[in-house]
Image (cartoon, rainbow, N blue to C red):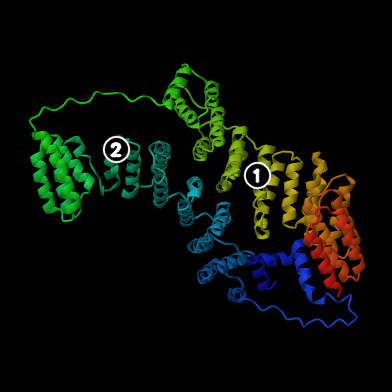
């Protein structure tokens, strides 16, 4: 097999389609363009001129480069040779083509080094989608496990918000392996990833549990943290106001041979002004200057303690020492504040009494929350909580009650309560909160349950960024003992895969997943229905593997399923695109014999294919059948049929057919009719 052919097979979708049979629309356009200069062949009395000489297409620069590098790779090349070749490419697409080509050679297998190289090349050139595809191959076992490679994958996932969960999936795979345990770099990236989510206090508490668990696993694995990691752990505790835990970690730093590099005390807020002033002077001595808010906090604190004169003296001293202090902003504004407090402290008038305290009235949401809390009697059960949650019209109030009940002694949420709150949040478009609860469920917060896990898969299927998460949930079900996937599970996953079948080169990649899913479904003893079998047939037909599609079609009776219009439609389309038009027409007639009506797209592709095969009688019969079912062909389909008749010397029949079609097709506009008529006159000249 020549390298140029393999290269075109790898990189060009259009060339891929040329190696198979093209779609009917593309065939039609090609046919029209090829005969554009020969339309007088059948109607003219002049002899047909000889065809122009054939000139082979010259190779593109990319194809030439590809062949050059393929020739440079001597037989018996090693992974190190491939790695060197990949790094030598300036074009990332050419590098990927070489990577794929070498994988097809007999006796050669990619290693972690070559996968590491190509992934780095793609990421550095912002080919993130292709990089994700290769990462999935690595995680599925395409090469041996390796710490630098897996750390780089985690780093890539950390840089993309949608791959947050994927980063921890990679970490779990490392943690459970024997020869690829996470190291300090792994934990540093994961702690940093968690800390990015610490943006709100209520969110902090949720992710703090993950940080604690990660810290315990790091210690259990014998990984010694450095100052950077310990600082992130301290920051996590401080963000959640668990300062005792933060101080405990701070005291432990010496045990790991780490020195604290920066820390801050809130001295002024505790009225320890002497210590606060000493810290300010120390800060200035290190060529750093406090901001306006820090100065105001310190100076106003002195004034409130009746030390206005000391505040003025301190301001003068600060002005001398702090060269970065702005005259306009700091001095004048601070002096105004000090004058106000000094005037108040030196005035002889008695201090007016403080205003009376009026407690804040409760909001409507707080009142509703307290009412429902009181309605939940002591010893409430999960069914009581479930009823309470469904009674709420406000999803935020329902979530507050869900969280409050989880904190009560002796109570634990079940799969039913989690199912209820997740459905409430999703129906009210609180997708972020729903994802948080889903992560709790998958981490073992409640017992595993088929309806709950199926709903989670459905939620993941509806969000493009959670494609991989849906299959993670499926794997957890498949490996469990009491929660095996059922027919609904496989239906959703097949449907999810079929959505990715939008381009021919992409179809082949996802077809392997569809095959694997089909085998697992059979192994699990799940009997498919017509809907699932239709999706499997569609997957094979999209990839032009029509023999496999027909095999599944023949097996439908074994499962007690009857083929419907969609079943026949997928097979007819696949056969016509494959070039097996006669067989496709046979399935069409079988379909008609069962009283099934094809779809509009099935009609169109069959008509065009029959016309291009010069089977005009069959094509006309299909057109009339289509019109009889209240569907009308489009302009391109009519042109394919009528121009085909003209080129075969049947111009009069074409005109008669056009008149007949105008009578039968009520949807044919005057504009379409004139366009077809002009085309026929043009061909007849």
8 or 3: which is nearer to us? 8
Asked if labels 1 and 2 touch by Cβ distance under 8 angstroms, the answer is no
Residue 259: percent from the left, percent from the top? 26, 48
- Residue 294 relative to residue 449: left or right: left
524 or 296: which is nearer to us? 296
Q: Is residue 408 visible?
A: no
Circle 2 sits on which residue?
Answer: 248
Quadrant (top left/top right/bottom left/bottom right) for the C terminus: bottom right
Q: Is residue 438 visible?
A: yes
User: Residue at image x 55%, y 57%?
Assistant: 129
465 or 133: which is nearer to us? 465
- Residue 211 relative to residue 11: left or right: left
Residue 523: percent from the left, percent from the top? 70, 42
Mark whose residue sits in front, 2 or 1: 1
Crowding at label 2, few (<14), some or many (≥20) Cα neighbours within 10 Å? Answer: few
Residue farthest to the front, as pictured: 670
User: Mark 1 falls on what kind of element?
Assistant: helix
Placement of 97 over or under 633, stated as above or below: below
Quadrant (top left/top right/bottom left/bottom right) for the N terminus: bottom right
Q: Quadrant of residue 448?
A: top right
Q: Quadrant of residue 362?
A: top left
Placement of 410 over or under 545, stated as above or below: above
Q: Which mark is residue 493?
A: 1
Residue 97: percent from the left, percent from the top? 60, 67
Residue 615: percent from the left, percent from the top? 89, 63
- Residue 61 relative to residue 333: left or right: right
User: Residue at image x 73%, y 67%?
Assistant: 18
- Residue 206 relative to residue 250: left or right: right
Comes first in the chain, label 2 or label 1: 2
- Distance from label 2 to label 1 (Cα)? 47 Å
């Amino acid at each position: 097999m020549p390298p140029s052919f393999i290269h075109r097979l790898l990189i060009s979708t259009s060339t891929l389609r040329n190696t198979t049979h093209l779609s009917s629309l593309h065939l039609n356009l090609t046919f029209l363009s090829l005969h554009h200069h020969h339309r007088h062949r059948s109607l003219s009395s002049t002899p047909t001129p000889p065809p122009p000489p054939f000139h082979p297409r010259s190779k593109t620069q990319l194809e030439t480069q590809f062949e050059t590098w393929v020739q440079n790779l001597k037989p018996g090349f090693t992974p190190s040779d491939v790695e060197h070749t990949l790094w030598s490419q300036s074009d990332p697409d050419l590098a990927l083509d070489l990577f794929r080509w070498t994988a097809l050679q007999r006796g050669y297998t990619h290693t972690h080094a070559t996968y590491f190289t190509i992934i780095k090349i793609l990421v550095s050139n912002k080919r993130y989608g292709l990089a994700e595809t290769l990462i999935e191959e690595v995680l599925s076992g395409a090469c041996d496990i390796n710490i630098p490679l897996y750390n780089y994958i985690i780093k890539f996932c950390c840089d993309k918000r949608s791959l947050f969960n994927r980063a921890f999936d990679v970490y779990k795979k490392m943690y459970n392996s024997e020869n690829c345990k996470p190291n300090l770099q792994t934990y540093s990236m994961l702690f940093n990833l968690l800390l990015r989510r610490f943006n709100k206090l209520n969110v902090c508490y949720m992710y703090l549990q993950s940080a604690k668990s990660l810290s315990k696993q790091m210690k259990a694995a014998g990984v010694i943290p450095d100052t950077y990691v310990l600082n992130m752990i301290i920051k996590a505790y401080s963000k959640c106001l668990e300062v005792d835990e933060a101080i405990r970690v701070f005291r432990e730093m010496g045990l790991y041979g780490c020195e604290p590099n920066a820390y801050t005390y809130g001295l002024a807020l505790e009225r320890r002004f002497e210590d606060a002033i000493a810290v300010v002077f120390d800060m200035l001595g290190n060529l750093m200057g406090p901001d306006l808010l820090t100065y105001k906090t310190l100076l106003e604190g002195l004034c409130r303690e009746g030390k206005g004169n000391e505040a003025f003296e301190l301001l003068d001293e600060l002005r001398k020492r702090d060269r970065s202090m702005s005259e306009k902003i700091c001095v004048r504004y601070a002096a105004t504040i000090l004058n106000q407090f000094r005037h108040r402290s030196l005035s002889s008038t008695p201090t007016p009494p403080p205003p009376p305290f009026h407690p804040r009235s409760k909001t409507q949401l707080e009142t509703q929350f307290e009412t429902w809390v009181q309605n939940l009697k002591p010893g409430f059960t999960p069914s009581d909580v479930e009823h309470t949650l469904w009674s709420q019209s406000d999803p935020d109030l329902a979530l507050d009650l869900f969280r409050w009940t989880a904190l009560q002694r002796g109570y634990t949420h079940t799969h039913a309560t989690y199912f209820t709150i997740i459905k409430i949040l999703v129906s009210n478009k609180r997708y972020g909160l729903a994802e948080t609860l889903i992560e709790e469920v998958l981490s073992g917060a409640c017992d595993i349950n088929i309806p709950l896990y199926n709903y989670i898969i459905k939620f993941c299927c509806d969000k493009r960024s959670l494609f991989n998460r849906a299959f993670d949930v499926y794997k957890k079900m498949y490996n469990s003992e009491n929660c095996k996937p059922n027919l609904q599970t496989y239906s959703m996953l097949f449907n999810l895969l079929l959505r990715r079948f939008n381009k021919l080169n992409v179809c082949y990649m996802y077809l392997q997943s569809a095959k694997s899913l089909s085998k697992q479904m059979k192994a699990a003893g799940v009997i498919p229905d017509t809907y699932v079998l239709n999706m499997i047939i569609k997957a094979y037909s999209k990839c032009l593997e029509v023999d496999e599609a027909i095999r599944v079609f023949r097996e439908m009776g074994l499962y007690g399923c009857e083929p419907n219009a969609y079943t026949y439609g997928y097979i007819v389309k696949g056969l016509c695109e494959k070039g097996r038009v006669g067989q496709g027409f046979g399935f069409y007639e079988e379909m008609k014999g069962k009283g099934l009506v094809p779809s509009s797209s099935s009609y169109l592709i069959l008509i065009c294919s029959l016309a291009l095969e010069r089977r005009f009688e069959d094509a006309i019969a299909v057109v009339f059948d289509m019109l009889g079912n209240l569907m009308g062909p489009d302009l391109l389909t009519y042109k394919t049929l009528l121009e085909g008749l003209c080129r075969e010397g049947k111009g009069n029949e074409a005109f008669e057919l056009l008149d007949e079609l105008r009578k039968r097709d009520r949807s044919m506009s005057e504009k379409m009719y004139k366009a077809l008529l002009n085309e026929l006159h043009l061909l007849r000249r």
